[in-house]
């Protein structure tokens, strides 16, 4: 069963203070890791800015939605993000796990303690 990761993140002051050249170098390094993750079945489904005009919107600035073939891919993605130094520059919240269909999720909610 596929696993998913939803990320919400906002730039920290360290990112805002980083010169443009260093930002571009960091982002290029992050981008260069994508082929290895893709080989593990990790796929970026959608990335973008959070629309804060939506009801109950997050205060974070950006989002990313990822699909992974399995738990190993999800772990590789989360570990790779951390190893890149991402969390030095972005305040991040992760939500990840195995995906289920709608009825399966309703059952999960029903069983919640």
Image (cartoon, rainbow, N blue to C red):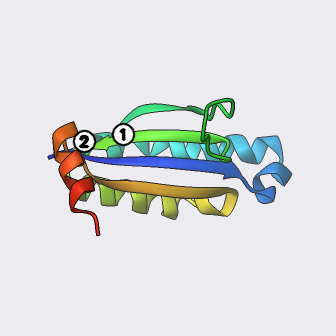
Q: Which of marks 1 and 2 is in front?
A: 2
Which residue occupies the foreground of this view, 95 or 90? Answer: 95
Q: Mark 2 points at which residue?
A: 41
The residue shown at (66%, 63%) is 88
User: What is the x, y in percent for residue 68?
Assistant: 27, 45
Which mark, by number, is residue 58? Answer: none
* Mark 2 burial class by Cα count in 10 Å: few <14, some 14-19, many 20+: some
The residue shown at (68%, 34%) is 52
The answer to whether 26 is drawn above or below residue 92 in the figure is: above
Which residue occupies the foreground of this view, 60 or 64? Answer: 60
The residue shown at (23%, 56%) is 110
Q: Can you say which quadrant of the picture contains the C terminus?
A: bottom left
Which residue occupies the foreground of this view, 53 or 69? Answer: 53
Q: Are marks 1 and 2 in contact (CB under 8 Å)?
A: no
Q: Mark 1 points at which residue?
A: 35
Label 1 vs 2, first from the N-terminus: 1
Residue found farthest to the bottom:
113
Residue 52 shown left or right of residue 99 in the figure: right
User: What is the x, y in percent for residue 79?
Assistant: 41, 63
User: What is the x, y in percent for residue 31?
Assistant: 51, 40
């Amino acid at each position: 069963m596929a696993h998913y990761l939803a990320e919400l993140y906002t730039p920290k002051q360290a990112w805002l203070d980083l010169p443009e050249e260093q930002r571009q170098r960091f982002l290029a390094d992050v981008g260069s890791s994508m082929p290895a993750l893709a080989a593990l079945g990790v796929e970026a489904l959608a990335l973008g800015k959070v629309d804060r005009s939506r009801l109950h919107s997050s205060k974070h600035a950006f989002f990313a939605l990822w699909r992974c073939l399995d738990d190993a891919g999800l772990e590789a993605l989360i570990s790779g993000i951390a190893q890149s130094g991402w969390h030095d520059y972005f305040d991040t919240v992760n939500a990840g796990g195995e995906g289920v269909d709608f009825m399966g999720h309703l059952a999960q909610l029903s069983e919640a303690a």
